[in-house]
Image (spheres, grey):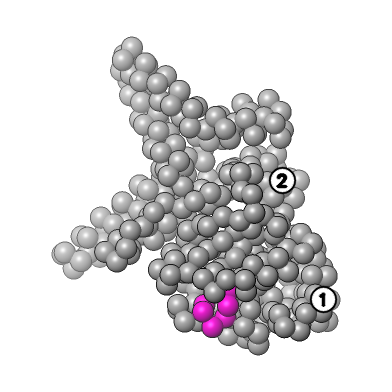
Amino acid sequence: MNLSKSISFIIPAFNAENTIEICLSKILLESQKFDSEIIVIDDCSTDNTTGIVDKFESVKLFKLKKNRGVGYARNVGCRLAKNNILCYIDSDLVISTNSVLNLVNTLISDKNNGSVGAIPIGTTLNKNSWSSKFVGLVSSFGFDDVLEKTVTTDAQSEFFVIYKDFLRKIGGWRYYRNAGGEEFELGDRITYHCKKNLKIKSATYETYWADLYTKFKKNIDRTEKYIHILFQRQKEKKISFDSIGSSATLNDAISALITGFITINLIILIFIKSISFFLLLIILFLIQFYLEFKFLLIAKKKYGFKMFFYSIYGIQIWNLGIVFGGIYFCINLIKRIFKNKFNIKV
């Protein structure tokens, strides 16, 4: 036990009866290396999440009376925590041995570190959906090139460490209508306060990646949120796209834009049989194939040719979620403009 590294584990949970037991079991093993406490914030679950958590006598359980979202639950955990080093872990994660120790050691090694996060393992624990393998590959793409650590623009909110006093100083967590988007916004504020967001290779986790259709819907919501975050501080500093592993990189944006053009082109071809539009469609596919070629090779290496060809299709569905998220953002922006200009309900 390292008494000089006191840590509070905070696990927000909502309807996590299928995942939280193995999650907590692994955290309990890792917690023995610290002077620690484990706090589960149940976000008004309607399943047996709390019943499972009650089996762990050393785990502190706090139940919210109303479902408020993961950001709110994380703030509650921050207020309840007695230690200055906070380790946030989502309830559907299985963390790797020594990952927490490596996160903490990295955090305290440099005063300029604002947050230090783990890197996801691309394989999925979700055995009910074959397409979750594709989602895991996309979500972890790029980390193979990391040697030890990398600076990112987003905070790895699923599994990361941060100082409590610093988190409170910069305003805590923002929370949204649905889970997702908090990591972009918090990472932006950490960077704004001249600290670094790191992800390190010596800290990893597995998770139950969603199926492609669920991820498609999440991409719509997360993209609408992310565009707000991308531009909200444009007057104060230059905002860049995210780095690897966040699905919000410049390469992701370009690929999604190409998918948008491909979709428009296909619609036009239905009504207008034109060789020019057909050639344009081929060119767009070739450009996108070039952009995604490295990912396709990794998909083939990991799961074979079946995943290679499925990924060509999966990339389009993934990207359409981003495209629709951009359209969703524009619609909401127009609504707000009309509401502010004419003082009417839209």
* Quadrant holding the C terminus: bottom left
Left/right of residue 92 with respect to residue 150 in the rendered view? right
Disc 1 is placed on an element classified as loop
Q: Amino acid at mark 1?
A: Gln
The structure residue drawn at horizontal position 37% and vertical position 48%, both measured from the top left corner, is 326
The numbered dot on residue 123 is 2
* Quadrant holding the N terminus: bottom right
Q: Give the number of marks.
A: 2
Q: Which residues, given as a range, are shown in magenta?
A: 161-167
Q: Going from the N terminus, do you reach mark 1 or mark 2 first?
A: 1
Position of residue 291 measured from the top left corner of the image (x, y, whole percent): 48, 32
Q: Residues within 10 Å of mark 1 (few under 14, many from 20)?
A: few
Q: Nearer the viewer, residue 133 or 155?
A: 155
The structure residue drawn at horizontal position 40% and vertical position 68%, both measured from the top left corner, is 192
Residue at which label 1 appears: 32
The structure residue drawn at horizontal position 53% and vertical position 35%, both measured from the top left corner, is 315
Left/right of residue 253 with respect to residue 38 in the rendered view? left
Q: Residues within 10 Å of mark 2 (few under 14, many from 20)?
A: some
Residue 95 is one of the magenta-drawn residues: no
Q: Nearer the viewer, residue 313 or 1?
A: 1
